[in-house]
Amino acid sequence: MYTLTKKQVTEMLIGCCLGDSCIEKRKSGDINNISFSHEKKQKDYLLYKYNCISKYYYPNPISKKENKKTKDFSGFRFRLYYNNSSNKTIIDFLNKNLKNENNERIIPNDLSLITPLVLYFWYLDDGYLSARLIKRKNSNYVRKQLGIALKSYSDESILKLIDYLKNKYSLNFKPKKVGNKIGWITMDNKKDMIIFFDLIKEYIDNITPESLNYKFCLFELPQTRGETFPEYNRCNCFKTGICKCRNKDFSVCI
């Protein structure tokens, strides 16, 4: 297992709380816990988070979770409760930087907190890399788009984040609206995606669980014009035209 330092675990927690995890509070407004959960097919990812956090803090044991409507087994969860000095210190830090006075989720005002490792876990939690087969009369190709969900955050803070990522890391994200509000930041250009992946490559290679390989599989085919990037073909689709990460057959493009 790729071991994270305590500082890196803090970065992981920032990325997770910007993504799928949440700081839960009681009706009184007092902090209760941070909740982590994933679908059963992503148990490997949840276990990695649990093992990293357990090295420095005291989460409760992993348990199964049920679908609220059907009561069927749907995945796994654990919580980091606000019940001892170590847990309180990190939860207070996260609450101060990721929640406002109205208990709303926010992107940190101090954008220097958004490190490559934070981006990696934020993308793992709330990102996507879509690959769609486009059939044309004379040729077929795979259209890709990378994005991160930010539906919970204000448009103003998202635009500031986009500018920061451009200036700090040369990342070319664009805002994508859902209705009248920005819901995603996205990339459509392959070279922009490569710049992002190169920034977090150490973590892609050493942390990414098998269940989430598809988020880093660019599916570059042999006849692609210009540069190819075999290190981001996560399932040998370069040779076969079949993307095992997504369980999709793109062989008509070869």
Image (cartoon, helix red, strand yellow):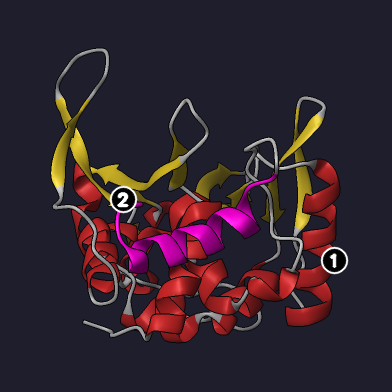
Q: Is residue 37 magenta?
A: no
User: Camera-side residue: 129 or 223?
Assistant: 129
Displayed quadrant of residue 224: bottom right
Residue located beneath label 2 in the image:
81
Bounds of the magenta segment = 82-100
User: Camera-side residue: 227 or 9?
Assistant: 9
Mark found first going from the N terminus, 1 or 2: 2
Identify whether 253 is placed above or below 232. above
Could you tell me the amino acid type at mark 2? Tyr
Across and down, in percent, residue 96 comes to 62, 57
**What residue is shown at x 58% (from left), y 78% (from top)?**
116
Q: What's the CA distance linking mark 1 and mark 2?
A: 35 Å
**What residue is shown at x 49% (from left), y 66% (from top)?**
218
Residue located beneath label 1 in the image:
163
**What residue is shown at x 14% (from left), y 22% (from top)?**
72
Identify whether 180 is placed above or below 56. above
Is the stretch drawn in magenta largely helix, strand or loop?
helix
User: Camera-side residue: 227 or 211?
Assistant: 211
